[in-house]
Image (tube, rainbow, N blue to C red):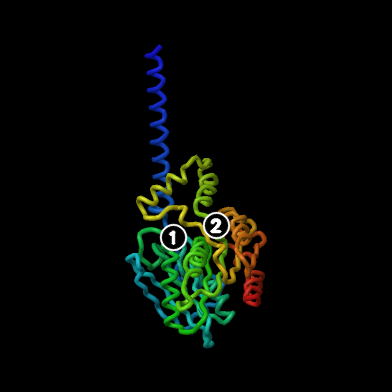
């Protein structure tokens, strides 16, 4: 009898060890796939490629003054971009943050929108994207501090001007984290961002990864995201739980326009709805009919432009 119990206990111990090894292994795999090995050039484009895109005015683009920007990030790499000056001397500049796997050139359609509204525009490559340095992206964790460096730079180049920020997907999560964690806590003597536009942001990185785990791998989240988060902290210096715009959105007092496609299958539309519900006024929500992830402007360009103009009319 005692021998039989010993075999059972040994079997249970081996089974638990196997489960732990699998759990650690799957967590490591997902951390590597999501952060360390993610191809940040998935949707990479170039200016020449974008010349054939109909979403912006290339003839005007060629006439504009563009000032190169090269910043030394506090994290040991360079950030590269450009300040596009509106042909009319204006006092508002908007910084545009692209999503994961993209680069600054894919944001030119938004540059066209803001140039039409009378803004200067900053386009730049986020860390580990395009021409900027950095070994990996952090889904907004380190990127929010890079954005603040960009804001500080624009404040020097355009003294006394108004600064705004527009982000798409990961860029939207970046600007919202900046809004709630940095901008909201800056002393009045330092440059601030006066408004934000967040197009298809995720409200919480752990929740988004759990959603993608089920969608792409058909796996329930049996602690895999938490284990991947632990590996991310060990390998890359940040917890997934540290990337949570909704945890800080109540701190944001400046106006925010939330935009989301109502047919988004990559980041649930409910994430923007939850962010909007939790943020104190002033705020605005636009759900783009029939638009999938990061397609709101392409699918409903005229309405998108109208909603942005409406937002600035309320600002």
Q: Nearer the viewer, residue 211 or 289?
A: 211
Q: Nearer the viewer, residue 252 or 269?
A: 252
Q: Position of residue 295 (x, y in %)?
A: 58, 62
Q: Which mark is residue 203?
A: 2
Q: Where is residue 118 in the image (x, y as percent from the top left)?
A: 57, 82
Visible in this render: residue 63? no
Left or right of residue 158: residue 265:
right
Q: Could you give the CA–CA distance between mark 2 and mark 1, rounded to whole angstroms?
A: 13 Å
Q: Which mark is residue 308?
A: none
Residue placed at 50% from the left, 66% from the top?
175
Q: Position of residue 77 (x, y in %)?
A: 33, 66
Residue lying farthest bottom? 89
Left or right of residue 154: residue 115:
right
Residue 80: which quarter of the image? bottom left
Circles 2 and 1, Cβ within 8 Å, touching? The answer is no
Residue placed at 39% from the left, 51% from the top?
232
Quadrant the C terminus occupies: bottom right
Q: Earlier in the sequence, mark 2 or mark 1?
A: 1
Residue lying farthest left? 76
Residue placed at 56% from the left, 65% from the top?
198
Residue 39 against residue 196 in the figure, above or below:
above
Q: Nearer the viewer, residue 93 or 64?
A: 93
| Circle 1 SS class | loop
* Residue under label 1: 141
Residue 167 against residue 17 in the figure, above or below:
below
């Amino acid at each position: 009898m005692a021998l039989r119990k010993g075999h059972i206990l040994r079997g249970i111990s081996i089974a638990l060890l196997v489960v732990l090894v699998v759990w650690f292994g799957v967590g490591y795999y997902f951390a590597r796939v999501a952060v360390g090995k993610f191809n940040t050039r998935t949707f990479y484009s170039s200016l020449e490629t974008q010349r054939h895109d109909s979403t912006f005015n290339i003839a005007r683009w060629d006439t504009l003054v563009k000032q190169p920007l090269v910043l030394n990030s506090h994290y040991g790499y360079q950030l590269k971009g450009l300040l596009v000056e509106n042909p009319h001397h204006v006092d508002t500049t908007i910084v545009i943050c692209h999503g994961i796997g993209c680069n600054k050139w894919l944001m030119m359609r938004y540059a066209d929108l803001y140039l039409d509204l009378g803004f200067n525009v900053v386009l730049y490559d986020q860390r580990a994207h395009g021409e900027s340095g950095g070994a990996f992206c952090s889904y907004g964790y380190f990127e929010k501090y890079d954005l603040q460096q960009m804001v500080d730079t624009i404040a020097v180049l355009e003294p006394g001007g108004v600064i705004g920020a527009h982000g798409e997907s990961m860029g939207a999560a970046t600007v919202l984290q900046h809004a709630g964690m940095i901008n909201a806590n800056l002393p009045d003597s330092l440059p601030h961002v006066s408004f934000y536009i967040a197009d298809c942001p995720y409200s919480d990185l752990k929740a988004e990864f759990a959603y993608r785990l089920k969608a792409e791998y058909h796996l329930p989240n049996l602690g895999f995201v938490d284990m991947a988060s632990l590996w991310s902290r060990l390998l890359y210096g940040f917890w997934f739980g540290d990337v949570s715009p909704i945890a800080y959105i109540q701190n944001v007092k400046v106006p925010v326009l939330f935009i989301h496609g109502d047919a988004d299958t990559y980041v649930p539309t409910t994430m923007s709805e939850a962010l909007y519900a939790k943020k104190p006024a002033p705020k605005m929500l636009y759900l783009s009919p029939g638009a999938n992830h990061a397609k709101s402007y392409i699918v409903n360009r005229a309405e998108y432009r109208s909603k942005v103009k409406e937002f600035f009319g309320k600002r």
